Amino acid sequence: MAHWAIAIGINQYQSQKLQPLLYAQRDAQSLRDFLVQEAHFEPSHCLTLTEFSESEQYPTQENLLRSIEQVCQTQIASDDVLWCFFSGYGIQQNGRDYLMPSDGDPDRPAETGIAIDAVMQVLKSAPTQQIVLLLDVNRSQNTVTGEGIGSQSFQLARQYQIATILSSQPQQFSHETLALRQGLFTAALIEAIRYRGCFTLDQLVQYLENRLPELSEQHWRPRQDPLTYVPLTQKYHLLVPETAAVQLEVSAPVGVTVGDGEIGSMGIRSLLERSYAASGIDEPAVALPPIDPDKQPTEYSSNGNPPVPTPASGAAVLLPKDPFWQRLFLWGSILVCVLVVGVLLRNAAVIFGRTKPALQAPASVTTPTAPANSLPTLAVPLDPATVIAAAQTSLQSRQFKDAAQQLSQLTPEQLTPETIALLEQANRGLLSQAKSMTSRTREPSSENQASDFVDAIEMARLVRPGQPLYDEAQQNIDRWSQIILDMAQGRADRSNDGSTPAAADNYGGAIRTALLVPNDRPEVYARAQQAIAQWSQLIFQLALDRAAEGNLDLAIQTAELVPPNTPTFPKAQESIAEWRKGQPPVNP
């Protein structure tokens, strides 16, 4: 039995109507790397088609269809396992679902796209039935034809009896996030196998159904639920080689229940035996290691690693090094380094040979008398050598902001290839620091992390027009502005269990987040303002509903959440005044 994989990821599309994706290509490559490096797939059995592939494997319509047909019809055997993964745009038109290749036109999906029906037919022609189709399909938020994609795919999966997992429901969007640097679907998919021991389709589906909504909420995205179909005969087939299942299971915390069974050191044997029975296999191809219950850890830390042994009561613990002195030495060293760098930067002019202020004219120079109605002028320009030396010092200490500001003092006439190279290095450092700010949302948090993207935007704005990497900085600002709005929408869509205070709080949080969208991004800013007006009206409507029920206290409490400077605010204030008098609410 061999294991095969086809991983397709497309970021850049030839059509301008399909905005570039951030991590579709990375998702395909990450999945392929995981399958090869950790799941023991043969590298020669894993085909990757992205923008960085060779010409014959570039993800065009022709290449994608030919590659899938070649693997299904000429390479795999009857007992092999095949993964087919796609990350990119999908289009639904006239009730039919299409995957969009790199040369696809969203206005002509029937001619330029790849029909899901055609993909299913090719997969069904393969000699094996152990196939899983994974579709991380994005829908353009500006393309109406994307509505409903997934419905036909689900029906075709049932018709052809092919296990199929789509990243979202037909009415939902499939999300990417800078915090994970992946799509949510791919992140959950790899996490399920790597850390949770989901080695069968049944376990994988159940994990994704729980995990994807959690990731959506943690990263402030609208809810995302997978759409899945798994034939009964394939529920317990192993997705990875037996050797990989044995080795990967040690990463799964003991006692974690996924699917129908407990996964961990004590559960892998029963899992494999169940898979062999479902597949009609009498004996495993590899010998399972013996399990000694006495040697298994009985508890795990939150990261799934065995706990550090605790010494017996009263026993002395001798550490090779004292952590207190280690920390003291570390922080002391950092403090000394900071002080030294500060002294160097503050006295850069003296250190690099300039003992007089840059703007001080030499005593021997006679400054001509200026006319009475004119402003004084500076006679001596900055010394480029001194500026360059100070910028180099800042770069060495990773003070990219200081380096950029120092180099920005030079006039266009003073710019040389050397100074331009230094400025590019400084700006690249600024963008790197800006991107690292966005990764602060990597850890799950219940707090709104939109401010991280605001900080990143402010850092990226330090790259000035006409400077190296300016266009890249502006592209990042555009992306981060859209992410802030996405996070606001995610907050507005959070479940409230029918609670008026919870619903109003969600809308209020969404408004506060949307207010962070920069006003110099006209398209995103206009949509943010429209959303703010809509959410404000929804808060006020909640208040009106409670007032109509006679609950004036809750109506007032809710209406007070309508933010100022919104069209609904004056009506909310008028109603609050009336309700406090115990009078009926005014009509909106």
Image: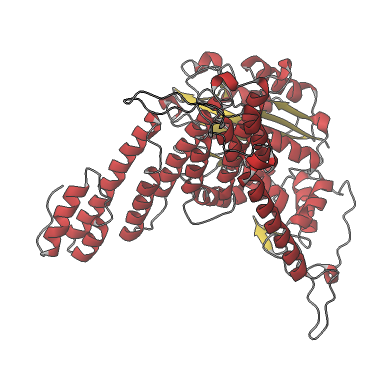
The answer to whether residue 572 shows anywhere in this view is yes
* Horizontal relation, residue 287 to residue 109: left or right: right
Label count reads 0
Q: Which residue is located at x 39 percent, y 24 percent?
A: 370
Q: In this view, does 50 lie above or below 176?
A: above
Q: Tell me where residue 149 appears, x and y as whole percent.
A: 49, 31
Q: Quadrant of residue 181?
A: top right
Please name whichever residue, 277 or 334, is drawn nearer the observer in this view of the structure. Answer: 334
Please name whichever residue, 161 or 43, is drawn nearer the observer in this view of the structure. Answer: 43
Q: In this view, does 56 lie above or below 507?
A: above
* Horizontal relation, residue 359 to residue 242: left or right: left
Coloring applied to the structure: secondary structure
Please name whichever residue, 187 or 319, is drawn nearer the observer in this view of the structure. Answer: 319
The answer to whether residue 162 shows anywhere in this view is no
- For the view shown, which residue lies furthest in the bottom direction? 314
Q: Tell me where residue 328 appears, x and y as whole percent.
A: 73, 66
Q: Is residue 312 above or below residue 134?
A: below
Q: Tell me where residue 434 appears, x and y as whole percent.
A: 57, 40
Q: Which residue is located at x 41 percent, y 53 percent?
A: 495
Q: Tell me where residue 381 appears, x and y as whole percent.
A: 55, 27
Q: Quadrant of residue 59?
A: top right
* Horizontal relation, residue 298 to residue 22: left or right: right
Q: Which residue is located at x 75 percent, y 63 percent?
A: 329
Please name whichever residue, 267 or 407, is drawn nearer the observer in this view of the structure. Answer: 407
Quadrant of the image containing the N terminus: top right
